[in-house]
Amino acid sequence: MGIKTFQQAISEALALEMERDERVIVMGEDIVGGSGADGEMDAWGGPLGVTKGLWGKFGDRVLDTPITESAFIGAAIGAATTGLRPVVELMFIDFMGVCFDQIFNQAAKFRYMFGGKAETPVVIRTMFGAGLRAAAQHSQCLYPLFTHIPGLKVVVPSTPYDAKGLLIEAIRDNDPVIFCEHKLLYTQEGEVPDEAYTIPFGEAAVVREGEDLTIVTLGRMVHRAVEAAEALAGSGIDCEIVDLRTTSPMDEDAILESVENTGRLVVVDEANPRCNIATDISALVAQSAFDALKAPIRMVTAPHSPVPFSDALEDLYIPTAASIEAAARELAEYRS
Amino acid sequence: MSGALHAVTMPKWGLSMQEAKIVEWKVPVGGEALSGDEVVDIETEKIAAAVEARHSGVLRRHIAQEDDVLPVGALLAVIAGADATDSEIDAFVADFQASFVPPDPTASEVGVPTDTVDLSGGVIRYLRRGDSGDVVILVHGFGGDLNNWLFTHEPLAAEHVVYALDLPGHGGSTRDVGDGSLEDFADTLSDFMAALGIANAHLVGHSMGGAIALTFALAHPDLTASLTLIGSAGLGAEIDGTYIDGFVHARRRRDLKPHLEKLFSDPSLITRQLVEDVLRYKRLDGVQDALATVAGQLFPGGRQAAVLRDQLDQLMLPVQVICGVEDRIIPPSHALGLPADVATHTVTGAGHMVQMEASAEVNRLIRDLAG
């Protein structure tokens, strides 16, 4: 046990699973030698150094790929069907577009179309989210797209502890898993056991208990919600925060139980507002917990716009603790 | 006079406790408090329980009010003789507050209070408290760890050297449980004592830990000073097999919580954080297998495999049995009909976790027997 970063937690999960199961391989761009590394092996470890050190321990089970997402994602899926358990890193979630057939039409469908006889134990690790001044093509929150597809499991961790336990669960899972890492969380610190452990999919974490209002959120927004809840507590508004951890499967019970208790719901989702996780949860609550609601549901999301390159506009684009707080206050003061 | 003034302070129950809320005063201002009496109910993020008086006297002042949230070590009340003057108490409070430094919440794990020892069967984590007096060893039950004695470590440490260990398969100790038998666990206990140079100890066992302590005492009466068996296994065949099975197999909060609630007379003591802590332990690789091995060995088919009550009269040492009247895991009737020289204490308002739900009474009974 010790204090570790989100990045270390992921790295540790990969190393432990590679140690435990020789079928586990990792592949991706720049994860071994890397750009500018002048041929030196293990120089880079991916754009954020997450896989650094693995090549020294596991050699050829760590594969550098060309910059051809469509090819290496397809290769990883194919390798999974032959019995390997690849963890493939697709640097930015924004580049998934060129791999949709491999992911949506192949990996996600094999188990179903082969009558349960085929397994595709592949994990696609990918960075998402705004805030790194990386502009419109490197900053999106595309987990709603994958959540939409039956046959995929989608993980969006918010803490180092969850990242490690959920990644090990993902690697041991026999279905394709899209593992989404917010790029501003890699330096987040928290207590992480040294040993391997697994967190089951479809179990949300209640990171704060409260009686007045429920905030359902995920990924980086969990931390902004906690900030907002602390400010609201000063005004006597007691928020419960539900961190989804996985969007597919989704822990509907945890959401409904909380809203049935508080009667007020704010959903915070960094994704664009149409057909995102916030709309999905709002529909669930409107359909299944309507009688419990004391106020309308509020969604706090990014606007329906590409992520701006301008620093000032990007800061405005991302939901903030202040925007979450304002939505919560509005509901707390709402009288029907 | 100042020697007769005593501070009641916020205890530290476990590694992560930083602060707690004052729920209710049990002794009013002007009321008499005997050492070991429950003075005030407090609530941490993990559990609610009572703070005990460490000295006898008159409770002269409540410093904390109900609903206050105060850090570990903070002054809660002053106990003094009836003859202490108000100005003496004012000065005592002022002195205390002037020198009190709340713990730094960011300084995690500074001076880690647990230690480890490497035995032939693997690493064992333990906690040691107290500097002098007889040795008391606390042995937790199935699925527990040394934190099950949260409310016992400090109160006993005033006059004893207290050890609490994590059994193999539990807490921070090795996952290797061998064949999971009582004899294996008892061997770990004797290895533990040998490694730490403990020649003789008062053994206190809870639940499965009681059966282990009893097995140990029967094999090593020379190393055992006394035996306190709390909600103990090994005294009858019945046990709630659905609890054992549920505890071993539950992976999710919703599945685990109803089982944990069976442990207490008051199920509201099971906080979300407590469930999360148990889940975090159960999620570690190897834990579920270890628990399943132990359960298969000791509780096959939902019955206790070892019933040792007929061997109690072989023990030529002080033995007491404590049980909660509302124990739903092991029937409290197992504490009845024991040999006449075994002292039996039944505690009302407590379930299986007697040492947590009625800590003041259990601590007093342990102190009484251990001298």
Image (cartoon, coloured by chain):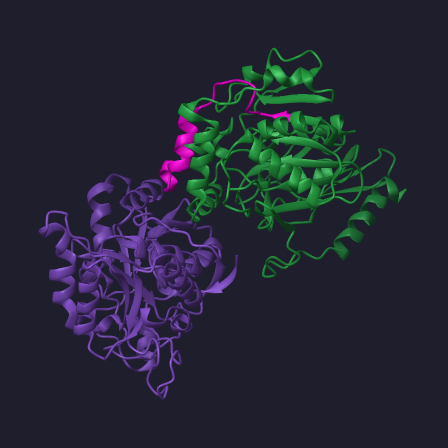
Chain colours: A purple, B green
Q: Is residue B70 left or right of residue B200?
A: left
Q: Of residues A297 and A97, which is closer to you in this image?
A: A97
Membership of B239 in magenta stretch: yes
The image quadrant that residue B78 belongs to is top right
The spot of residue A306 in percent (x, y) is: 22, 75
| Image location (x, y in percent) of residue B248 | 41, 36
Q: Is residue B340 above or below residue B259?
A: above
Q: Which of the 4 image quadrants contains residue B316?
A: top right
Q: Which quarter shows the C terminus of chain A?
A: top left
Residue closer to the observer: A19 or B358: A19
What residue range appears in magenta? Answer: B229-258
- Residue found 56% across the figure and 37% down from its top: B48
Up-down: is A54 above or below B285?
below
Q: Residue A110's image quarter?
A: bottom left
Q: Name the residue at 66% across, 37% down.
A: B190
Can residue A129 be seen here? The reply is: yes
